[in-house]
Amino acid sequence: MKRLLVVGLSIALVYLVYTGTLSVVEVLIAVGIGLALSRVIGVDLVKDESKLSVRRFFEAVKYALKYFTVIEYLAHYSVVKAILSRDPGLKPAIVEVPYYVNSEIAVVTIANSITNTPGTVVVDVDEKRKKFYVHWIFAEAFEGEEARRGVSAEFEEWAKKIFD
Amino acid sequence: MIDVLLFVLGSSLMVLSAVLSLIGAVGFLRFRNFFLRLHSATVGSIGGGVYGLVGLALLTLSLDVPGYLKYYIFGVAIVSAALVVFASPTGSHILSRAAYRSGEAAPRPLIRDKLKEAGLE
């Protein structure tokens, strides 16, 4: 029930923000479509209903705010500096980064966060051994905890708080 | 007061995103390798795309135009920004994985290749 409502109302919210209207007819259409879609895809989107909580939602909001200000700024700054400087000082390498989260969505969140910051791109993932293979243009370490600290430690901490 | 603030913030974000798009394009020309170019593509898509769209949304809110138009453009910009954030890394993952596995784009120069060492190819 909780899953149906949360997924349905989220879809309705996206619909209303996208159309930019708040008339009664539109709200009814949005909620109707949202609940119908939620009935179909809700089970795939939310595997564990007990994890839906307000605390996790606010953690996600906090993460988004920090990610799009501080983290993206620092990553963009280093890559922009490399692009514009005469001697970019690149050290490109494909490094092995371990991860310790369990849920699929947390793995996707970490991989997307890594790729969305300029300077690191996930090339492959080994789900059995729980390793990302990341193309890092300023490689400081090649494997283990040191590589994890440089690439994904912070994202993983947030992903654990939000999804695991 | 709030209108002025939104206008300044929105237009600054749009100028920033224009500059970052240009720098991303310069990076495309300067980096001579597929994997390095992916990084400057990220500068173009996140810095040049997402920040620009968020800037457009804030800028529209501050303008003196009819409400439905204002909120419509705001909504489209915000939803598009979210879509770029979620979809563009997926594209990068597929491209980099395909380029690496097919061997079409050799990742050179490369100081170490842990993926080759792991033998997952």
Image (cartoon, rainbow, N blue to C red):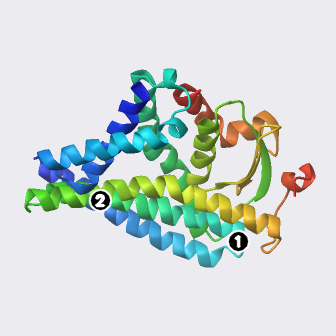
Q: Nearer the viewer, residue A44 or A109?
A: A44
Mark 1 — residue?
Answer: B34
- In the image, residue A63 lies at what x, y percent? 47, 35
**Quadrant into which the N terminus of chain A falls:** top left
Q: Position of residue A19 (x, y in %)?
A: 23, 56
- Please state if B33 lies on the left or on the right of A10 as rendered: right
Quadrant for residue A79, please give it: bottom right
Q: Quadrant of the C terminus of chain A?
A: top right
Look at 76% across and 59% down and name the residue there.
A92
The chain to which mark 2 is attached is B
Question: Does residue B13 appear in the picture of this structure?
Answer: yes
Q: Residue furthest bottom?
A: B29
Give the mark nearest the N terminus, 2 or 1. 1
Residue occupying the point 83% across, 37% down: A129
Point out the frontmost of discs 2 and 1: 2
Does mark 1 fall on the same chain as mark 2? yes
